[in-house]
Amino acid sequence: MDKKITVNSFSKYRLDRAKQEYQVANLLYRENQLLAANNRAYYSIFYAIKAVLAIEKKDFKKHKDVIAYFNKEYVSTEIFPKRIGRKISQAKTIREDSDYDEEYEPSSETTALQIETAKELIELVEKYLDDLQNK
């Protein structure tokens, strides 16, 4: 059976993926696996951004290009609040530190903020996509 994938269904798939990663981040956080929780929270953010880009049929190979495009087209134009752009940049840095800096030890508070950023962005993206569909 040939299943036609629409822009909206692909966007929903990516948003669902963001939600799954958010849930995993919370589980890891509760188990005090802070480095891994930071990683999964970042990927939650990343997939939420990609859910927005799916509507435009835009994609990039590099994370920095995904984030730069989102910031240029959606944050600087204030479709999404400027504060979320700053939080996304911070989340990317924390994820990189967690994954690549062997001496990095995140605090529980830092990881909690990372997870909160993921939650906030998912909620903003859901509202944005709902508003688009209700136009």
Image (cartoon, rainbow, N blue to C red):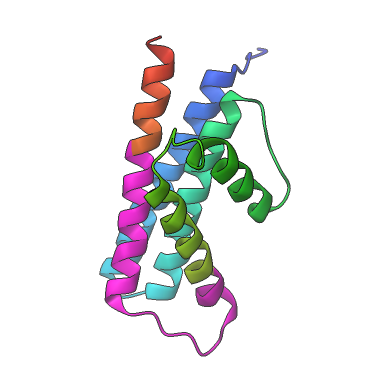
Q: Residue furthest top?
A: 135
Q: Residue at x 37, y 21 (%)?
A: 130
Q: Nearer the viewer, residue 86 or 41?
A: 86
Q: Residue at x 62, y 49 (%)?
A: 68
User: In what quadrant of the picture does the N terminus appear?
Assistant: top right
- Residue 25, how many percent across, how many down? 37, 59
Q: Residue furthest bottom?
A: 103
Q: Residue at x 57, y 83 (%)?
A: 101
Residue 66 vs 33, above or below: the answer is above
Q: Does the magenta-highlighted stretch encompass residue 3?
A: no
Main SS, magenta residues: helix
Residue 34 vs 65, above or below: the answer is below
- Residue 2, how many percent across, how many down? 67, 13
User: In what quadrant of the picture does the C terminus appear?
Assistant: top left
Q: Nearer the viewer, residue 42 or 76?
A: 76
Residues rendered magenta in the picture: 96-123
Residue 68 vs 13, above or below: the answer is below
Q: Quadrant of residue 96?
A: bottom right
Is 52 left, or right, of 135 in this rendering? right
Q: Quadrant of residue 115?
A: bottom left
Q: Residue at x 42, y 24 (%)?
A: 129
Q: Residue furthest front?
A: 77
Residue 105 vs 94, above or below: the answer is below
- Residue 111, how many percent across, how many down? 34, 69
Instruction: Tally the numbered discs.
Output: 0
Is 48 left, or right, of 55 in this rendering? left
Is 105 left, or right, of 1 in this rendering? left
Q: Does the magenta-highlighted stretch encompass residue 97?
A: yes
- Residue 26, how many percent across, how many down? 31, 59
